[in-house]
Amino acid sequence: MDDLSDFELIKRNTLEIITEEDLKKLLEEKKSRSAYIGRATTGPLHLGHLIPLGKIFDFQKANVDVKILLADIHAALDDLKAKWTDLEKRAEYTQKCIGLSFDWPKKITFVKGSDFQLKHDYVLDVLKLSTVSTVERTMRAASEVTRMKNPKVSELIYPLMQALDEQYLDVDIQFGGTDQRHILAYAREYLSKLDYRKRVEIMTPLVASLQGPGTKMSSSVPESHIKVYDSEESINRKIEKAYCPAGVIEDNPIIQIARFLIFPSENRLVIERDEKFGGDVEIDSYTHLEKLFIEKSLHPTDLKNAVAGYLVGRFARAREYFEKHMDLLEELGKEFLP
């Protein structure tokens, strides 16, 4: 069990908290706390999308209840491929991928955006917020998560809604990747203009592409990512080919998978290797793993084998489900197929 305070658990593996003082105050004053993370139901769900969800293990250990927003309306506002008629199927797909990929200690609440974002009070608040938000400020908020070369009006509505989600989901914390920073900062600044309280905003790192520095995990580049229902053969092949130079921690996707996904959920990683290479070793913390890897006491191949084995097991339920429901993937489009 992690011998860390609630604050230390929540801060672990984060890049920024707005603000740490507010988080400490929240933890001191409230025994019942809640947080949310949103997932726009756009393209195929892959490993890069799951890494921020690994943070839920720390939140639950710190007695924070977590809601996952299936952001179907956001997806339609931001993605031309996300047709309004496909919202239900995309939300079902996203929830299945996430739900089948994790075994959190406590129950997670899934909330579909369209279940509350189309109601009178919410829409009225979007309009109210639009009257106090300049185009320049809103474009800056949306710049990291939308396509801003030729922005649509819908892309400027996006950050307004994400800010209001904190209020209507009735949470104390919003968290997400660093690509969300401009929107999270906007929420801190603008919710109070409607007399709503400021929330704590927490940012987690983005994971490097399996292909290494200079690239990003993208649904359009198959070898850059792993879908949660990829075959065992595909997972093993992609991990075997992944960027993982000996002794290098920075921008190393294999190291990052261990740090942000495996250790928060398992607290250990077992490396199986031949006796002539040192025999099996149980690594009980990320700090221990990093030390061994930097010292080159742990070979990249041995680490890759352990990480691949973990992912094959972690995604077994999702893989089995979608093997039986390939029709759902086919309906969503060829980019969703394994």
Image: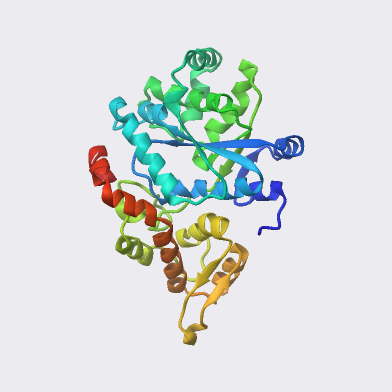
Q: Quadrant of residue 304?
A: bottom left
Q: Residue at x 62, y 17 (%)?
A: 193
Q: Residue at x 37, y 23 (%)?
A: 152
Q: Quadrant of residue 151?
A: top left
Number of marks in the rendered image:
0
Q: Quadrant of residue 41?
A: top left
Q: Residue at x 70, y 38 (%)?
A: 23
Where's residue 171, x and y in %?
Answer: 60, 31
Indicate left or right for 309 with 190 as reference: left
Where's residue 166, x and y in %?
Answer: 57, 28
Q: Is residue 227 visible?
A: no
Q: Classify the position of the N terminus by image quarter.
A: bottom right
Where's residue 326, x and y in %?
Answer: 25, 46
Viewer-side residue, 291 vs 43: 43
184, above or below 194, in the image: below
Q: Residue at x 60, y 51 (%)?
A: 13
